[in-house]
Image (tube, rainbow, N blue to C red):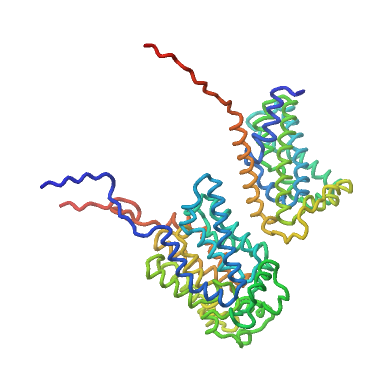
Amino acid sequence: MFLSESFRKIASDGLWNNNIVFGQNLALCPLLAVTGTATNGLGMGLATLVVITASNGLISLTRHLIPSEIRIPIFVLLIAALVTLVDILMNAWAHELYKVLGLFIALIVTNCALLGRAEAFASKQPVKEALWDGFMMGLGFLLVLVALGAAREISAAGTVFANASLLLGESFRFLEVTVIPNYKGFLLMALPPGGFIMLGFLIVGKRLIDQKLATRKVPVTVLTPVIVEEEL
Amino acid sequence: MMVHLKPSSGAHVGAKSSVSQIMWQVMLALTPATVFGIWCFGWPALNLFVITVLSAVVFEAFCIRLAGRAAMPVILDGSAVLTGWLLAMTLPPWAPWWIGVVGSGLAIVLGKQVYGGLGQNLFNPAMLARVALLISFPIEMTTWANVSPLFFSDSPGLVESWRITFAGLENLDASTGATTLGYIKTEFSQNRLLTDILKDYSGFLDFIGWTRGSMGENSALLLGLGGVWLIRKGIIQWQIPVSLLLTVVLLSGVFHLIDSEHYVGPLLHLNSGAMMCLAFFIATDYVTSPNTKTGQLVFGSGCGLLIFVIRTWGAYPEGAGFAVLLMNSATPLIDHYIRPRIYGRDRKGKPLEIPKS
């Protein structure tokens, strides 16, 4: 592997072990609000990925200048500046997606996961590690958003990535798949309760996999029978 | 002669009834209304009933096996059968088979087993499933078959009934219509007055159950009798049903007196919809209702109030399911504020003063 041990640990933490949603149970508000479809999840995930990587880098870069007494307001200001940039850029370049996600882009400012990474990681680590951590955390969050969006979309409407070409451009038309043709539609899953229910199932799935991995990792100790000659 | 009594544990009073006995007695009380309902709506109703109860048992067994326990004793306690039974009572009798299966899955898996099984659930599983189905599949859940009793000419035959249950109903308009409450709600929106709407309404037929609706909605008489029998047997207490029905009667009575053309009278409220089934069989669920008698009075009248409000001003013609779920969520709060007095202490929990002799 080209990655050193610590970088690999940051990656596995961000993607799986300490995943923003599965591990830390943070950022549930945007998670549940925008994951009605996989496309929306992808859009929100990409926006958050950009912001969290940039904010981690920026905060790590300025960590020696920030007085610790007022660090939280400064973190929020830095994040807000970045979110404003992303917000304006998305409005210009991905207007359709921006119309769907609307308020939730601006609300990335209040996403506790970003502040959490800034406080727990970026403010104490060098720039390279902080950027890598932000990217991996963002990627982990993006994967959960897409997985949850896809699961809800399949159960609610029988499709995956519907309207992806409208939102992301013609080249993404290949993503649009109708999984279950002639599906009646299970409306509950598209509504907020469906988000909670499906998230519950995904977390159960993650823990089941963790359990399986844990039992596999335990070294099998074979007790070899030792025959002791009894002394008489 | 000296008798040595060595107490090995605290003094406990053993109750005669077990979980399964209670469940089977509730089912027995439901039987007259169910048999009448199946007779009214013919073989499709029986198909759906069997499918719903069987799939509830299968889901229960699956969940228990998943938890690594033996499924048989849990299934024999009858709670899954009763949940499936109650759910089947609240479904449109000619609904397709998958409504029953999805409903049972929602009730048993999401309504009961994810909380940890019998006794742990926050919400009444059957009502949770019914409301989830109603929100998800509004068309299937509001297609009400006409009364077409078994062994009469317009009742579908056995083969025909399988087609209705497994392939879906064709020619809807010929064999279905609105429930009384649904009809009144629609006609109100056309600015018609109540005396005009209810020209053809017969309170007596509605009372014995000769009306469109789910099996748990049609016979107020038989459901009420079953409920009264349960109270006589001591399975349920009178507090919840009486406070629930009384609240609805009082509210609808007052509004009906004020404006009899726009507010439905108390008799129609009691007769129609899931009122009786709810008051006696669903709101009285031990797990999801308050523990104290005062709390149960609060719970019952809360249910009654919500039913009246939803029926009168809400978007849905029948609000029984929503009302029970809302009050279920208030149950922990009621139990927090209304507590039983501890023996030897006053209401506030302070020890009683011991009189000096």
Residue B147 rendering spot, x and y as whole percentages: 61, 79
Which quadrant would residue A231 be assigned to in this image? top left
Residue B134 rendering spot, x and y as whole percentages: 64, 65
Which quadrant would residue B28 be assigned to in this image? bottom left
Residue at the far top in the pictured view? A232
Quadrant the C terminus of chain A occupies: top left
Residue B216 rendering spot, x and y as whole percentages: 54, 71
Residue shown at the point (49%, 48%) measured from the top left: B70
Residue shown at the point (15%, 47%) measured from the top left: B3
Which quadrant would residue B193 be assigned to in this image? bottom right
Quadrant the N terminus of chain A occupies: top right
Residue B140 in sight: yes
Q: Along the horizontal axis of the image, is A142 left or right of B119?
A: right
Residue B315 in sight: no
Depth check: give the residue in front, B11 or B191: B11
Residue shown at the point (67%, 64%) measured from the top left: B137
Residue at the far left in the pictured view? B1
Q: Along the horizontal axis of the image, is B185 left or right of B353?
A: right
Residue A144 rendering spot, x and y as whole percentages: 70, 42
Residue shown at the point (70%, 67%) measured from the top left: B167
Depth check: give the residue in front, A83 or A132: A132
Q: Along the horizontal axis of the image, is B13 left or right of B24?
A: left
Total labels drawn: 0
Depth check: give the residue in front, A218 or A29: A218
